[in-house]
Amino acid sequence: MAETIYILNGPNLNLLGKRQPEIYGYDTLADVEAACAEVAEAAGYAIRLLQSNWEGQIIDWIHEARNDAVGIVINPAAFTHTSVAVLDALNTFEGPVLEVHISNVHKREAFRHHSYVSLRADGVIAGFGTEGYALAVRRMVSLLG
């Protein structure tokens, strides 16, 4: 059985492809999942892509990942800038963590320039559109060696 990389997504990403396509593009979360699965499977890994608008659900998945995943790719969305709880949960995970943002958060509103998650992340990918997810999976495979 292949080892699993969790890909966690925060609030409003269920609307990817429909919400503000001028910022986030037209790819859906299903498109992201297919691209990530292709990269992971070519390297002998599986993915589990999850999305929730609820902070507690994301924390529960991080806790689950402690036993079931070798790495976490996370786009916490708005929780990036607000959630010490997500940071604390990530700090309990022993494998690599990569943070992904579809847009270049540093070209946006000032409040988006701060990330609690970055305090734990082993790397951050921002501004590459949905391609950033597949890039993160490629990097994760490299980190896992």
Image: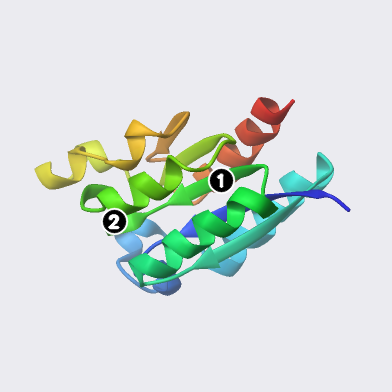
- In-image side of 130 versus 69 (left or right): left
Q: Which residue is the extreme one toward the right?
A: 1
Residue denoted by label 2: 79
Say which amino acid is labelled 1.
Answer: Ile
**Image mark count:** 2
Residue denoted by label 1: 72
Separation of marks 2 and 1 at Cα, in angstroms: 16 Å
Q: Residue at x 34, y 35 (%)?
A: 118
Dot 2: element: helix
Q: Residue at x 19, y 38 (%)?
A: 113
Nearer-N-terminus badge (2/1): 1
Say which amino acid is labelled 2.
Answer: Phe
- In-image side of 37 versus 28 (left or right): right
Residue 70 placement: quadrant? top right
Where is residue 145? Give x, y as percent. 74, 25
Q: Residue at x 61, y 31 (%)?
A: 139
Report whether residue 109 is seen. Answer: no
Q: Is residue 91 above or below residue 33?
A: above
